[in-house]
Each structure stands twice: as C-alpha cells, then as structure tokens.
Amino acid sequence: MPPQKNHTRRVALVVAGVLVAALAGGLIRWGLTSAFGGDSKQEAIAKSVSEIKKQSDLPKQLDQVTTWTDVAAETGAIHYTYRVSSDVDPSSLTEAALRKTVLPTLCSTAETRRILDDDIAMRYTYAFDGSDDTVDISFTKAEC
C-alpha cells in the first residue's frame, strides 16, 4: 500500500474508533432514564460515566490502532481517553481533521445529540504510544 494511502487509512481507523466509542457511550447513557430523575446535570454525568465504565470493560481495543482507556466525569462534560498505536504519526491526527470527521456524526446521531443538547460537552483526548504528543478536543451543542 502506498505511504499516503496507508497514512489515510490509519487516520480513518482512529476516527472510526472514536465514533464507535461515542455512540456506545451515548446509547448507554441515554438508556439509563432513571439516572435523570431530578438529578443535577453533574450528577447525571457522574452516574452515566459510572454506568459506561461498568458496561465497557476498559481498556477496550476499538480497532487496529486505537484503544479506549478511560471515561471520566468532568464539570459539564464526559471525557473519553484513548491511546493510539505508535504506527500512527501523531501529526496525522489533528484537531481540525477530527472536528471535520467527528462533529457531523455527533450532531446527527440522536443519542449523542441529546447529550450535547443537555449542555453536556463531549471531550476526547488521544495519547500516542512512544510520544508525548496528545490531541485534546471538545464538542458542545453550540457547534451543532
């Protein structure tokens, strides 16, 4: 496979892994209707993250190059953390590329859109094996 095609394929695999995890997290969260019975937004985030952790068996290999390592409750956000294989050049996974690929899916998928519409941000951090480089990106309802 030519180097550019291989590079593009790896970036696509990472992004696909993100979407799988986001949708799984969204489905789990919104399946827990009892978690929202009068709870504050922060309590709902904490309960959702707790349930996601129970059902997700982390760390979880999402694809050939991406491992979902954690999900955490933050003030106003659900934070997903990933490790990306050293086979992927950190410069190939930019914030701009992630926004262009991930945002349309987050905004158009009912489960993740409901999370955003409740003013809960979705934050993603990617750490690269063998490197100190990271990519940290957040999405809010204002971006949809």
Image (tube, rainbow, N blue to C red):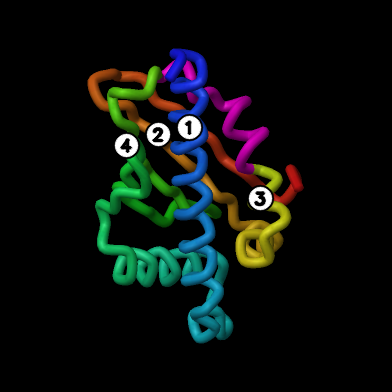
Left or right? Give the position of 69 relative to 30: left
Residue contact at pointers 3 and 4, CB within 8 angstroms: no
Residue under label 2, please give it.
126
Residue under label 4, please give it.
83
Q: Amino acid at mark 2?
A: Tyr
Quadrant where the N terminus sits is: top left
The x and y percentages for residue 96 are 62, 25
| C-alpha span from label 1 to label 2 | 6 Å
| C-alpha span from label 3 to label 1 | 18 Å
Residue under label 3, please give it.
105
Left or right? Give the position of 28 relative to 88: right
- Helix, strand or loop at mark 1: strand
Q: Which of labels 3 and 2 is toward the front?
A: 3
- Helix, strand or loop at mark 2: strand
Q: Which residues are magenta?
A: 90-102
Most frequent secondary structure within the magenta stretch? helix
Residue under label 1, please give it.
136
Residue contact at pointers 4 and 2, CB within 8 angstroms: yes
**52 is higher (above) or lower (below) than 137:** below
Q: Amino acid at mark 4?
A: Arg
The x and y percentages for residue 143 are 74, 43
Q: Amino acid at mark 3?
A: Thr
Badge 1 crowding class, 10 Å Cα cut-off, few under 14, some 14 to 19, many 20 or more, is: some
Q: Nearer the viewer, residue 36 or 110?
A: 110
Whichever of callouts 3 and 4 sits on the residue coming sooner in the sequence is: 4
